[in-house]
Amino acid sequence: ANVIDVGTGTGILAIASIKLGASGVLAVDIEPYAIKAAKINFQLNGVEKQIRIGQGSIEAIPGAKGKHESASWVIANILAGVLEQLFSDGLGALVQPDGFLVLSGVLMAQTPALRACLQDYGFNLVAGQGAFVRPDVLTKLVAQDKIHEWFIPNLSAGMIAHAPSNSRGKEYT
């Protein structure tokens, strides 16, 4: 998968990812009702063959030799406190080197703490909630997957962070 959707809920971000050009999505959620709703929505939108779904959190993301699968885009629309906990569980390690982490569902008052968390885990904030976006960074985002066309205009309650090409963020234990 080139997109991982953590906390998929109804599956709307996973569906949008496929509709905007992602080759595949791995979606996870801890709620059984969310999994059921997402599967129905995937079928209604004709994308069920391009999206794998699993119940659980980061531990539900398969991988080889104790490492989780990774993707060039990792998306999560979850409250800031949960996002901070997910970082300690390995959220940053899901993002491939030179990939992007898109976070939403964050209140303005919570952004300073989440920004600090992103920096602690080796991510560089490139867009979102008052952050300055350099034209060259925006151009690079545009050059990535078509998925940017949806994320960029909808950042009023979220952030995009970039994983440096020389790391996969801080590893978890």
Image: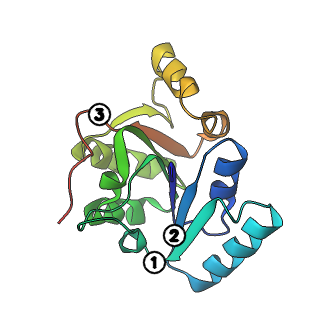
Residue bearing mark 3:
164
Residue bearing mark 2:
28
Q: Earlier in the sequence, mark 2 or mark 3?
A: 2
Question: Of the residues shown, which amino acid type is indicated by label 1?
Answer: Gly
In the rendered view, tell whether residue 73 sits above or below residue 41.
above
Q: Earlier in the sequence, mark 2 or mark 1?
A: 2
Residue bearing mark 1:
56
Question: Residue 173: percent from the left, percent from the top?
Answer: 17, 66
Front residue (pair 117, 143)? 143
Question: Residue 29: percent from the left, percent from the top?
Answer: 52, 73
Q: Earlier in the sequence, mark 3 or mark 1?
A: 1
156 sits left or right of 103 in the view? right
For mark 1, give the secondary structure: loop
18 sits left or right of 52 in the view? right
Question: Residue 146: percent from the left, percent from the top?
Answer: 64, 34
Residue shown at the point (64%, 49%) measured from the top left: 17
Q: Residues within 10 Å of mark 3 (few under 14, many from 20)?
A: some
Question: Of the residues shown, which amino acid type is indicated by label 2?
Answer: Val
Question: Residue 161: percent from the left, percent from the top?
Answer: 41, 39
For mark 2, give the secondary structure: strand
* Contact, mark 3 vs mark 1 (Cβ under 8 Å): no
* Contact, mark 2 vs mark 1 (Cβ under 8 Å): yes
